[in-house]
Amino acid sequence: MMSSKLIARKYSLVAIMVVGMVVACSTVAGSMPAFEAKVSQDQALQRLGEAFITAGKADGLSIAVIENGDISFLNFGTVSRTTVQRPTETTVYEIGSITKVFTSLLLAHAVTDGRVNLQDDIRRYLHGEYPNLEFEGSPVRLVHLAEMTSGLPDNIPDLAPFIEEGGMDRTPFLISDRWTTYSNADLLIDLRTAELLDRPGAASRHSNVAATLLGIILETVYDEPYENLVSRYIEAPYGIGLGTGEDRALDLAPGYNSSHLAMPALGGRYILSAGGLRYSSADMARFVLAQLGAADDAVRLSQQATGGEDHAAVGFNWRISTSADSGRVLRTSGGTFGASSYVEIRPDLDYGIVLLTNRSGAEGALHELAEQAFQRTGVERGGTERPAMPVDDRAVGEESSH
């Protein structure tokens, strides 16, 4: 027969075990809705991605969704039209004009490092005289290069002769060959006869010349190659792979146009700071994580609007708007001869999305896909369907490196 002390101890242990089981079951039960929501979100994205490929809008498609520090990768289609090979999160794509956001972030670092001021006249950093780089007494300033309001032409040399000569299919090869042999030194010579299209700061328009010139100025300010600056301030701190160089070129997805013809990749240093970087969806997801974390002054500065209005502001090559239900929205897109890309971040929701494809001219379709993903995953996680924001044709159409 047990003593009263032993009986009491036995029932105490039983009580502890029961409480532990209840707590454990409560913890598991509490985690199930979050797990189920995550699965449901991924299923919604899976359906959207499959429909995108089935509709013939891309050959290969890589998506990264970043939310509350978690990353989901989804891949669809094939990276090659000759052999079926599904892309992965390590497949590298040209990011086109999204490169301009990277270049503008370097400018933000130069500002926070105390090396430049956004209101500096750009001629302060150019050798020789450039009286043409002002409009009725208003000079082009550094901030104008980063907010797409410089008034500079889109491309130097003018691409119209190549387009007239080559037609839809040959033009990319003619332009690519020209950009490969054209140098930054050539640009600085030709820049002396360039005419501003408008007063700096007056209107937002795409300009590869502005971004290339900003890259040249940053190299002058730091006395280092552009590639080194990208590595030091962005790639190394964020843990992403190199966006330049031959090693990364081996992982590059072949690019195609809307007629399914293989297209040339961008080459040469002239276009590098305007549209020449190449990354995978895993790389870009880490970039977005850093943007959402905004842990340093340069990143915070680079997300500030410097021009435009609240509903359609611009700053550091981001298109910035405000949504009633999700706060600030920053968007950027890019296009090359054989690739399209789109990135969107919503800092107030700790949410971002990356979409990369090896098909040119798909920027608008990627924008729409991003909106659908944001709406559908909101429903899947138990929210209400959000109204889709209208596609900014100017933003998407102008965010192209060709």
Image (cartoon, grey):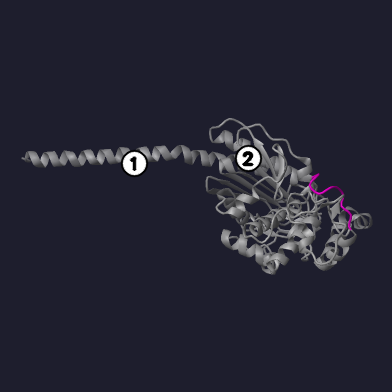
Q: Residues within 10 Å of mark 1 (few under 14, many from 20)?
A: few
**Percent position of residue 194, x then y:** 89, 57
Which quadrant does the N terminus fall into? Answer: top left
Q: Residue at x 77, y 62 (%)?
A: 124
- Range shown magenta: 194-203
Secondary structure type for disc 1: helix
Residue 60 spot, x, y in % from top left: 70, 52
Query: Residue 198 magenta-drawn?
Result: yes
What amino acid does circle 1 point to? Ala
Q: Amino acid at mark 2?
A: Arg
The residue singled out by tag 2 in the image is: 328
Mark 2 Cα within 10 Å, few/some/many (few <14, many 20+)? some
Q: Which residue is mark 1?
A: 24
In the displayed orientation, state which residue is furthest to the top. Answer: 384
The secondary structure that dominates the magenta segment is: loop
Rendering quarter of residue 394: top right
Place of residue 68 in the rendered image (x, y in percent of width and height, measured from the top left): 52, 45
Tell me if residue 41 comes above or below residue 80 in the rendering.
above
Q: Nearer the viewer, residue 268 or 94?
A: 268
**Which structural element holds mark 2?**
strand
Position of 359 relative to 241 (above/below): above
Camera-nearest residue between 275 and 60: 275
**Mark with earlier residue (1, 2):** 1
Q: Is residue 265 visible?
A: no
Percent across and percent down for residue 63 are 63, 49
Q: Is residue 62 magenta?
A: no
The residue sitting at 81% across, 57% down in the picture is 209
Mark carried by residue 163: none
Residue 257 appears left or right of 301: right
